[in-house]
């Protein structure tokens, strides 16, 4: 499948998933704009990179104008910037709560608030993929981040309903654990965390940025025009059931020999 020539804007482009998204969309022939708060921004596959904070209204409005001036109207928006605070609820500071909620909800709101009017004006529709998380569906730690990712699912539905008649589709791609720099701090504390987490995943492994990017490409593809307002979980079966619980209760039944 080759889809050529769309303008695709990706936030959090310098991160583990963001870099692979940029590479894979560019390999399809798309012109990719990457936004991230960090510098320097050397990101393979991007036609333009901009340093901006997704929670900063002026920076985002300016960056979006710059992308449109340079590459043309934006066809696809991937809201990928995000980060989670692991602090338990009773130890959260108001600042760390605000940080996660602002980054996930305000950050996603702002890009969509500025880009959707452009898509409407162009009259060609468009596709938005918001990167959610399994944390938005069930509690798995990081209370502020999880609450915000749950809110993002509802914002996605609101925009899908509102702009569906204009051909603008809005979906969530919600990964389970994906091996990326987001895990660096946790690995420092628990070097065996990868092995321990794998036990919770029915497919027996953690996710990769490529797993997520393939699903995002599917959702962004205008051929899938009947898919909007929904969440595609890319989670190796994590939300389907609990293999560790089953092992504890029924270990004698877990022999696969027939
Ligand atoms: N890695 C996982 O296990 C996992 C699981 C579920 C969901 N996700 C989601 O996937 C997305 C990407 O995560 P990742 O694993 O690649 O993390 P990452 O830490 O590797 O990348 C995140 C990127 O977002 C950027 N960013 C942070 N704050 C920003 C801001 N204010 N403005 C602009 N950019 C900002 C960072 O600089 C970084 O480059 C996030 O939305 C995350 O919540 C990740």
Image: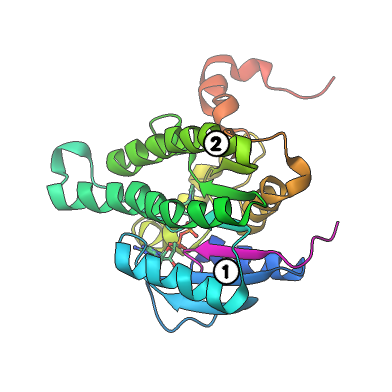
Q: Callout 1: few (<14), some (14-19), or many (20+) C-alpha neighbours within 10 Å?
A: many
172 to the left or right of 102: right
Q: Earlier in the sequence, mark 1 or mark 2?
A: 1
Secondary-structure class at tag 1:
helix
Residue visible at 53% across and 28% down in the picture = 244
Instruction: Pick the residue in front: 170 or 79.
Output: 170
Residues shaded magenta: 1-13
Marks 1, 2: nearer the viewer: 2
Secondary-structure class at tag 2:
helix
Ligand 1 location (quadrant):
bottom left
Q: Which residue is mark 2?
A: 160
Instruction: Pick the residue in front: 156 or 190.
Output: 156
Q: Where residue 221 sits in the image (x, y, percent)?
A: 73, 50
Q: Which residue is mark 1?
A: 19
Q: Is residue 14 visible?
A: no
Q: Looking at the image, is 160 positioned above or below residue 36?
A: above
Question: Does residue 5 belong to the magenta stretch?
Answer: yes
């Amino acid at each position: 499948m080759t889809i050529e020539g769309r303008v695709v804007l990706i936030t959090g482009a310098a991160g583990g998933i963001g870099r692979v998204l940029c590479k894979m969309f560019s390999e399809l022939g798309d012109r990719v704009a990457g936004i991230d708060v960090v510098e320097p921004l050397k990101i393979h596959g991007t036609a333009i990179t901009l340093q901006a904070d997704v929670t900063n209204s002026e920076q985002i409005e300016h960056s979006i104008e710059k992308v449109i001036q340079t590459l043309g109207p934006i066809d696809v928006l991937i809201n990928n910037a995000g980060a989670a605070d692991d602090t338990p609820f009773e130890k959260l500071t108001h600042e760390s709560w605000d940080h996660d909620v602002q980054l996930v909800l305000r950050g996603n709101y702002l890009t969509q608030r500025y880009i959707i009017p452009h898509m409407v004006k162009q009259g060609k529709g468009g596709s938005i993929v918001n990167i959610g998380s399994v944390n938005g569906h069930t509690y798995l730690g990081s209370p502020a981040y999880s609450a915000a990712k749950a809110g993002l699912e509802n914002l996605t539905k609101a925009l899908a309903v509102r702009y569906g008649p204009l051909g603008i589709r809005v979906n969530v791609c919600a990964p389970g654990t994906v091996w990326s720099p987001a895990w660096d701090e946790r690995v420092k504390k628990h070097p065996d965390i990868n092995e321990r987490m794998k036990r919770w995943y029915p497919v027996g492994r953690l996710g990769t940025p490529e797993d997520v990017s393939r699903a995002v490409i599917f959702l962004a593809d205008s051929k899938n025009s009947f898919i909007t307002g929904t969440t595609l979980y890319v989670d190796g079966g994590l939300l389907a059931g609990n293999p560790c619980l089953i092992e504890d209760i029924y270990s004698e039944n877990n022999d696969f020999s027939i």
